[in-house]
Amino acid sequence: MPRALSPSVQAPRSAWRSAYSTQRETLSHLGHRLLISMTLPPAIDRRLVAEREAWLASLAASGDWVRLPAFHRPFPQGNASGALLVSGAVAAGASAIALTGARPAPSLMLGGSFEVDTDANGRADHMQSYITGSTGAVTYEIGPPLPGATGLRSQRITAATLGTASGDAIGVRQDMAGIIPGRPYTMAVSVLSATACGLRLYWDWMAADGTTVLGNAQTTVTAPLSTARLTHTATAPVDAASVRAYVWAQANPVAGIAQINLDDWQFEQAGAATAFAGSPVLRAGDWLGIGGVLHQLAADVQFTDAGTAASCALVLPARKAIANAAPVTLSRPTGTFQLVDDSAGVAYSPGLVQGEIALSFVEVF
Amino acid sequence: MRTLNVSAQALLDRAIAGEQIGLVQLIEVLHPTVPQRLTPAGIPIVYGGYTWLPDLVGATVISHDAAGLPGLEIVLPAVTDAQIAGGLDDAIDGAAVRVLEGLVDPATGAVPDALVLWSGTVESREIADGPSGAVTLRCEHRGVRAMRRKPTRYTNTEQQRLYSGDTSLDVDPMTDAPPLVWPAASYFRQPE
């Protein structure tokens, strides 16, 4: 982090102001660029001094191009995380983008509050059905929220005649990536059962190639007849890269109708369950890295429970066209910058003290 | 006079109402084999089915003189071999040049319409290589060419151009008008 940093924006435009109404008309010339001016403090450490000298010399040799992060805000203020993607191609000059794939940190799950069912199949977006064994007709519905849960909806799963064998089950599942071996993971879900049955919180640890590393990380409880928050914790084994998590009802004491209602399902890297994170958000001023370009959000973005945001206003219009499904970097995004002056040098004073270095960079493509 | 289409007129109305709207110039040099479509704006512009490349062009102010037929100088980079080759290529002489101007929708980046500000042809060029490389194309307004004297000659080619099929001037002096050979004076003095 430099001693002084001043990010700013270059926005060439022509304006005309009425002498009488003082109303201003402005035409933009679409030369928007981010500027970063910084000052590196004097240094005496021999290694640092040499590194800086080499860095400045190599800048000149490489056309003065360098990738710089937003030093002052490398991580977003909002809790959105995960593999965000741009939803829909955007032309250069556009001032808003749509995003998808946002998870509310610390949860790794998409749509855990079961609020959005885009295809109206009764199952919340990103949730897959899990039906096995003797169940009779199974119905997925979006129901009212459970008491104390966030949002306006919950997931209801009903089996007409759930069998009593251990392999008879109805539920939902979701695959999540980004598992770190050796770390504890906790699943929590609010459950309300309409009938007396068993309930299992279950997950399989998967390797990067999709094979199961270790199954049966599970706990089996009696499905609560009044809303309860159930949790289970397990440690990711070696080679685990992703997880396939399930919640299911099973083993009806007497074969017959079974119904469970699920809400606020969360899967997080933690030794104990934390409060449900809700829907992801990003805050005004947060930086996104898209296609090697830094973009700053002009306003808060509230994602849906399914992790989508239809319109995210950008401070500067897109300087390059953005492809559909372009990945978005939230953590330490960088952009390509060029020294404003042709080259910068270093000056030493007696005692091999490297003087303060002032640098100004402008964004380039 | 051409008017803007509905979308572009709506953008112009928004600009007049005070909203900041993007305005871009688009410069088209119709080199016979490598047409150049460039914009001095800072972003690539998609218009007319082409992507107009940003930043790689500078153009002089189009100043209208008394004749109303201003010239134009376009400055292109001459840094890469391809750019230098483009500046050296004779084929660019006489290439058609157009300058268009359009408003950019700030929400989508689209240019709904563009009007032709200037059109003409490349008249001469200059290339400077060195610490700063530049190709300068000097272009003349199409009106200059229109007003230039065009001598017409009393020839069959010109007659065919003006009145196709009229062969009145299709004559060969050697065959259609052979030299008259008069008999010698002795011919008339021959005895009867």
Image: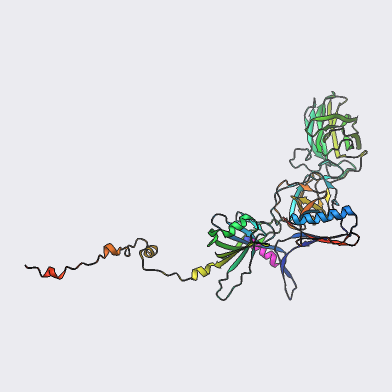
A98 vs A153, nearest the viewer: A98
Quick check: can you spot residue B63?
A: yes
**Dominant secondary-structure state across the stretch colored magenta:** helix
Relative to A144, B131 lies left or right: left
Which of the 4 image quadrants contains residue A49?
bottom right
Relative to B36, A127 lies left or right: right
| Quadrant housing the C terminus of chain B | bottom left
**Residue at position x 15%, y 71% in the image:** B185
Q: How is the image coloured?
A: rainbow
Quick check: can you spot residue A226?
A: no
In the orientation shown, which residue stands out farthest toward the left? B192
Note whether B64 is above or below A222 in the view shown: below
**Residue at position x 17%, y 68% in the image:** B183
Q: Which residues are magenta?
A: B8-18
**Residue at position x 85%, y 29% in the image:** A214
> Residue A104 at what x, y percent from top left?
84, 45
In the orientation shown, which residue stands out farthest toward the top? A165
In the orientation shown, which residue stands out farthest toward the front? A350
> Residue A311 at what x, y percent from top left?
76, 52
Which of the 4 image quadrants contains residue A166?
top right
Residue A66: in magenta span: no
Task: Please state the total of marks drawn on the protein image.
Answer: 0
Which of the 4 image quadrants contains residue A17?
bottom right
A109 vs A353, nearest the viewer: A353
Relative to A289, A2 lies left or right: right
A59 vs A47, nearest the viewer: A47
Residue B13: in magenta span: yes
> Residue B79 at what x, y percent from top left?
65, 58
| Quadrant housing the N terminus of chain B | bottom right
> Residue B187 at what x, y percent from top left?
13, 68
